[in-house]
């Protein structure tokens, strides 16, 4: 098979006729498939059914000397703090257990910066005219929407194979209006990039002009390998402490892709000084998060070893889905020279880069044929992908046979979009 | 027994000697008792153990065509919306289900007003210099802390036996800087006052100068009778709609005192226009609240009839505790003429008014003798009770025998405080 760029007009015309016919046939199937969000599939949810029955009667609800059913203990269950400290490699006293959503914990952190300022803020961020936030791209649309809502100018920073472009970041943080950065350090959303140790050290050593420069370290996929063994990953909180910047980073994680996506537990980890300050502000917002659910998770997950064993079950379910996507791209897109991608070993996404100018049209063609993808551009702040190239593929939800159908549509749509552009 | 005001100095000296000796004896018992917060007791928690086992396996997690374990459905489970609409008397489409804390829903509403403005705000509240909030007093300390945190000047409004002083409120809302009011309309915290129908109608008809004037209607004790039958209560959302102010009120409730205080479900109810606007802003903060726990509650509570039957069980546990407090006050405080109180039929508190200038000292004396009460002044904005008179008694947590001991201390402490003041 030839690359499109190497075809002559006759060949291109022939290919276009073939692709158009194929696309029409797929459209006639009236598919209704969804690869838009990183939602675990039903078999993954069924793998953690023991969570439902982890607590059976009042006696099960006592732990660490407290009755988890009642009010109290804003920072959460000590047993849960210990579990997440072990998973993240930090100290239990650096952990606050939240409700079911780490996104909410991140939003609330930015909200507190905006309304009240963070630990070292000279003033609330709302009073910093021209405030800016660094956004490695492609990145997570829900991150960008938070800093958009709070009025930050968002500065895209290229994500390289070993993490964000640190040269650029070291330069940008010289501006005191740059208040923070979004990071998904392990199996980044969507590329699946793992930040290198050198990247982590450069983050920890960052000399930011803003005294309240904040790294939001969304370690969403900290134990989420779907291929190979667990990849140990340095503790950023310790690294920042050692580098003399203990209060520069807030780390987040959740069990949304470990247990139940809509009913897991989330965690915020940071220096003790940061947590003391946060807890003081949180105390106005709530009495305590759901400790009953925290205890269910402690009973189910027990410790890092048990958690990693569970993640192997998830991996066994996810791997064939990722293989399906990658096989289709290998077989259909690579030979035609119209897209590239990375091959992640963990996380929830495959990040497809089409030739420039094809992403929006490809996603639209997919939609017409009944396949919903994350909107093109979503991986950029404000949805503005300057190359119109990046498409986030989320293969976790559909069963493999549906994925096969969806990928056939996606590949055909990209081919058609490319041929429309060339002709 | 004579009132202190009717005693001569010899009688007062004799009484003081008796009380001092009694107080010292109580102190020597080294008690450690807590009447500080409206925390349900262990027997109340045990009464809802079926919540733990309400969902047993994956098949139980499907309802309304959705898998509650997975992401999605920001407004919550339709079955839960229907249940709470029935309890509150509003429409299901006027209900958003939250996480475990109604306090958080209220905080987040004020936060959104502050950061972004509410449905009819000309600008975010953060940009309204001199913004004000009305605070019926005595009231709930955690309410006041929210409006304090967001920089509102808090204006106390007297709470009368049929609700807040509406003459005063109708006058105050002519000021466009008055942006809202805190209300606990049924069994108010701490007095246990039930707003009258006329009060409700005057609220609904309020002509506020601020287009975004907001009634926060914290219906925390909507089904929380501990004496007598359920008291029907008009739906404020419907009343406001009928009065031409559909977007003026946001109602809140939770199961914190129905099921598990730390792990119940909370609800925000408001006009559809308000909810549409809120949902748009909430969509940046989270994907969805814990629908698994919402479903557990639907299974346990089923409908209003079942919920009220459960509340009768709670009432049977609470009634003897309230009786204990009231008996002590009747027996020890009334004859000495040093305090007054109301006799609520629901809610979680008894509100004791000492003679002016005695509350702080009484609470301090209790603390010295090992009995923790809510801080004196806590029922006023900024903790400033101008009369130093109001003490909130929370009898729900301690078993009756502990309450008896605690009330003996409280009565003795108040007597001592009064005698110190007179001499």
Image (cartoon, coloured by chain):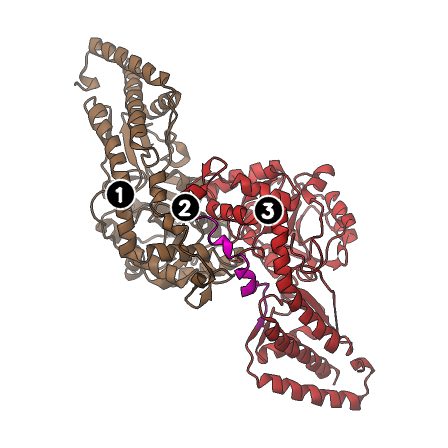
Chain colours: A brown, B red
Q: Which residue is mark 3?
A: B125
What separation in Å lies between label 3 and label 1 (alpha carbons)? 48 Å
Number of the label disc, if any, that sits on residue A177:
none
Q: Which residue is mark 2?
A: B57
Task: Same chain for labels 1 and 2? Say yes or no.
Answer: no
Chain at numbered mark 3 = B
Instruction: Residue A103: say if magenta.
Output: no
Number of the label disc, if any, that sits on residue A315:
1
Q: Quadrant of residue B386?
A: bottom right
Where residue A62 sits in the image (x, y, percent)?
44, 64
Element under disc 2: loop
Chain at numbered mark 2 = B
What separation in Å lies between label 2 and label 3 (alpha carbons)? 46 Å
What separation in Å lies between label 1 and label 2 (alpha carbons)? 22 Å
Judging depth in this view, the residue of A147 and A65 nearest the camera is A65
B365 is higher (above) or lower (below) than B396 = below
Magenta-drawn segment: B34-57
């Amino acid at each position: 098979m030839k690359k499109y760029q190497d075809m002559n007009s006759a060949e291109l015309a022939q290919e276009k006729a073939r692709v158009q016919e194929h696309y029409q046939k797929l459209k006639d199937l009236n598919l209704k498939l969804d690869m838009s969000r990183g939602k675990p599939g039903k078999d993954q949810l069924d793998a953690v059914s023991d969570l439902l029955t982890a607590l059976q009667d009042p006696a099960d609800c006592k732990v660490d000397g407290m009755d988890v059913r009642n009010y109290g203990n804003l920072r959460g269950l000590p047993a849960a703090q210990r579990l997440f400290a072990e998973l993240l490699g930090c100290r239990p006293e650096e952990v606050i257990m939240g409700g079911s959503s780490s996104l909410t914990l991140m939003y609330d952190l930015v909200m507190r910066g905006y309304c009240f300022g963070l630990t070292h803020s000279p003033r609330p961020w709302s009073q910093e005219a021209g405030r800016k936030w660094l956004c490695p791209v492609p990145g997570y649309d829900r991150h960008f929407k938070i800093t958009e809502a709070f009025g930050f100018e968002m500065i895209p920073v290229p994500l390289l194979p070993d993490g964000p472009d640190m040269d650029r970041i070291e330069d940008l943080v010289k501006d005191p209006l740059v208040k923070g950065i979004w990071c998904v350090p392990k199996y980044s959303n969507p590329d699946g990039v793992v930040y290198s140790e050198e990247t982590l050290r450069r983050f920890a050593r960052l000399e930011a002009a803003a005294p309240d420069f904040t790294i939001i370290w969304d370690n969403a996929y900290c134990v989420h390998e779907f291929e190979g063994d667990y990849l140990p990953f340095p503790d950023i909180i310790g690294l920042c402490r050692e580098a003399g910047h203990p209060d520069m980073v807030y780390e987040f994680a959740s069990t949304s892709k470990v247990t139940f996506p809509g009913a897991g537990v989330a965690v915020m980890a940071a220096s003790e000084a940061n947590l003391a300050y946060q807890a003081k502000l949180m105390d106005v917002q709530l009495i305590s998060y759901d400790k009953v659910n925290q205890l269910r998770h402690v009973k189910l997950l027990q410790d890092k070893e048990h958690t990693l064993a569970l993640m192997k079950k998830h991996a066994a379910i996810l791997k064939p889905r990722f293989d399906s996507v990658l096989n289709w791209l290998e077989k259909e897109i690579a030979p035609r020279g119209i897209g590239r991608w990375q091959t992640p070993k963990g996380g929830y996404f495959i990040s497809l880069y089409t030739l420039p100018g094809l992403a929006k049209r490809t996603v639209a063609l997919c939609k017409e044929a009944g396949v919903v993808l994350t909107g093109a551009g979503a991986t950029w702040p404000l949805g503005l992908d300057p190359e119109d190239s990046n498409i986030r593929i989320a293969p976790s939800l559909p069963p493999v046979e549906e994925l096969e159908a969806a990928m056939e549509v996606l590949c055909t749509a990209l081919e058609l979009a490319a041929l429309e552009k060339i002709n």
